[in-house]
Image (cartoon, coloured by chain):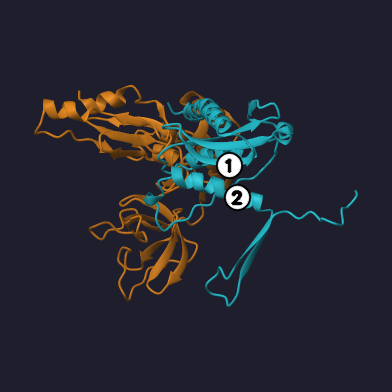
Chain colours: A cyan, B orange
């Protein structure tokens, strides 16, 4: 592989200093900030849906393990997180789901793009939609797009979210089918 | 019957998801009976907010006369509730209290005086690692939960240290409740196969002991498998076990 000596490739990185109170000095260093931003997106969406006031003085650990990635990873993480919280029986005010839209070079909107479609796209938008009013709870975007395109993507995602919520309902029904 | 029941009626026995809202018409109630306020009890999984009721868990909506509603759910996560009896594991002794792991988000404390016949001189014989069957007297989201092994009269009433030998395992909270209900078919069916002792805590912990280790393990496996079986499937399985060369 040819290495470009002039501009070595480093992922985005970041650091925070003296974040721990007890030691005399401490720092964090992160390479690959994208992972952290994804984590933040999932975290904030979950916090918005959970009724965390019912569980003070307790912590919640959500582990998301990527088994396979063929595009729309953040949306998939959001859906997995929502189902896991629901399975744990945590009190939630609403459900949420993630939908990814890709806008390709010709301006067509592709929902739930594969990794290949993501690579070829001009812009990539992921929305978290809530189950009650179908509002956007979180958005994460990459690339350039017009306001109109974004609004179209939101509308498409809201329609797509109904399919996901129906799937949630069906899988919970299947789970409780033996108890009915 | 009333407007509250009518908004639930269609869904009773059906599956509800977090975020499902039940709306009842508050204004019509006031017109009908402006003095007598309608009473309803929101059980686990339901929250009342003004004139709407919000489901905050997934599960099956249940109803009990006259107006008690709750969500039956198959979760594994336990949240301590005052008055519930649970199986705890003693994890530490510190001064005059024991720390007990009950499977909640926090360990519960158990005073050494909260045993039958215990005095300052006569301490109960409790070791780290012992199992205790105890009841919550303080269970509050803002405070450390506290257990006791005596009832209000100072009697043990079945509580205390137990579990020499035997086998402890975890099931879902829903199954633990089903095992404890007086008309539980599961226990009745299982008793026909062979005799065994069982302790069930509302925190989903089950302790069993039969004549031999083999029989204990059979009972434990059968109980665990009851989680996802219909009544017919369960009876068929139990029949096979009873007939088998075990």
Which residue sits at x=53%, y=31%?
A: A151
Are discs 2 and 1 both within one chain?
yes
- Where is residue B162 drawn, in percent x and y? 43, 56
Chain of residue at mark 1: A
Q: Nearer the viewer, residue A59 or B14?
A: A59
Dividing the picture into quadrants, the one containing residue B115 is: bottom left
**Label 1 Cα crowd, 10 Å radius (few <14 / some 14-19 / many 20+):** some
Image quadrant holding the C terminus of chain A, namely: top left
Q: Nearer the viewer, residue B70 or A29?
A: A29
Marks 2, 1: nearer the viewer? 1
In the image, taking residue A132 as reference, residue A71 lies left or right, namely right
Which residue sits at x=62%, y=52%?
A: A36
In the image, taking residue B57 as reference, residue A16 lies left or right, namely right
- Where is residue B243 drawn, in percent x and y? 56, 28
Residues at marks 2 and 1 touching, judged by CB atoms closer than 8 Å: yes
Chain of residue at mark 2: A
Circle 2 residue: A37
Dividing the picture into quadrants, the one containing residue A98 is: top right
Badge count? 2
Circle 1 residue: A140
Which residue sits at x=33%, y=21%?
A: B10
Which residue sits at x=46%, y=41%?
A: B75
- Where is residue A21 drawn, in percent x and y? 52, 72
Q: Nearer the viewer, residue A5 or B246?
A: A5
Is disc 2 placed on a helix, strand or loop?
helix
Is disc 1 placed on a helix, strand or loop?
strand
Rounded to the nearest angstrom, the CA distance separating label 2 from label 1 is 9 Å
Q: Nearer the viewer, residue A26 or B207?
A: A26
- Where is residue A54 drawn, in percent x and y? 37, 50
**Label 2 Cα crowd, 10 Å radius (few <14 / some 14-19 / many 20+):** few
The disc label shown at residue B25, or none = none
In the image, taking residue B117 as reference, residue A121 lies left or right, namely right
């Amino acid at each position: 592989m040819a290495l470009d000596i002039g501009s070595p490739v480093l992922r985005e990185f970041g650091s925070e200093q003296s974040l721990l109170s007890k030691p005399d000095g401490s720092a964090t260093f992160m390479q690959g900030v994208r992972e952290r931003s994804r984590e933040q997106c999932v975290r904030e969406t979950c916090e918005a849906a959970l009724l965390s006031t019912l569980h003070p003085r307790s912590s919640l650990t959500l582990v998301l393990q990527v088994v396979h990635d063929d595009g729309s990873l953040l949306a998939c993480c959001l859906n997995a997180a929502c189902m896991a919280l629901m399975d744990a029986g945590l009190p939630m005010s609403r459900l949420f789901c993630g939908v990814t839209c890709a806008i390709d070079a010709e301006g067509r909107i592709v929902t739930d793009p594969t990794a290949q479609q993501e690579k070829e796209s001009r812009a990539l938008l992921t929305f978290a939609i809530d189950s009650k009013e179908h509002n956007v709870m979180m958005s994460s975007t990459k690339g350039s797009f017009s306001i109109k395109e974004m609004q179209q993507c939101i509308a498409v995602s809201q329609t797509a979210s109904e399919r996901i919520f129906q799937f949630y309902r069906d899988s919970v029904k299947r789970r409780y089918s033996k108890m009915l | 019957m009333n407007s509250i029941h009518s908004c639930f009626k269609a869904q009773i026995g059906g599956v509800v998801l977090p975020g499902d809202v039940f709306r009842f018409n508050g204004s019509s109630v006031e017109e009908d009976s402006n003095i007598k306020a309608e009473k309803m009890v929101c059980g686990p999984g339901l929250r009342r907010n003004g004139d709407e009721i919000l489901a905050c868990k997934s599960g099956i909506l249940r109803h009990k006369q006259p107006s008690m509603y709750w969500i039956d759910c198959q979760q594994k996560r336990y949240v301590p509730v005052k008055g519930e009896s649970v199986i705890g594991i003693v994890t530490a002794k510190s001064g005059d209290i024991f720390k007990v792991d009950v499977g909640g988000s926090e360990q519960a404390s158990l005073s050494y005086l909260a045993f039958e016949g215990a005095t300052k001189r006569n301490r109960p014989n409790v070791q780290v690692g012992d199992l205790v069957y105890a009841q919550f007297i303080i269970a509050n989201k803002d405070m450390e939960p506290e257990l006791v092994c005596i009832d209000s009269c100072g009697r043990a009433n079945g509580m205390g240290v137990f579990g020499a030998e035997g086998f402890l395992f975890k099931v879902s909270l829903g199954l633990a409740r089903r095992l404890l209900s007086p008309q539980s078919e599961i226990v009745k069916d299982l008793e026909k196969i062979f005799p065994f002792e069982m302790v069930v805590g509302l925190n989903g912990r089950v302790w069993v002991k039969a004549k031999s280790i083999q029989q204990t393990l059979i009972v434990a496996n059968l109980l665990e498998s009851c989680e996802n079986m219909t009544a017919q499937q369960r009876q068929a399985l139990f029949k096979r076990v009873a007939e088998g060369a075990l």
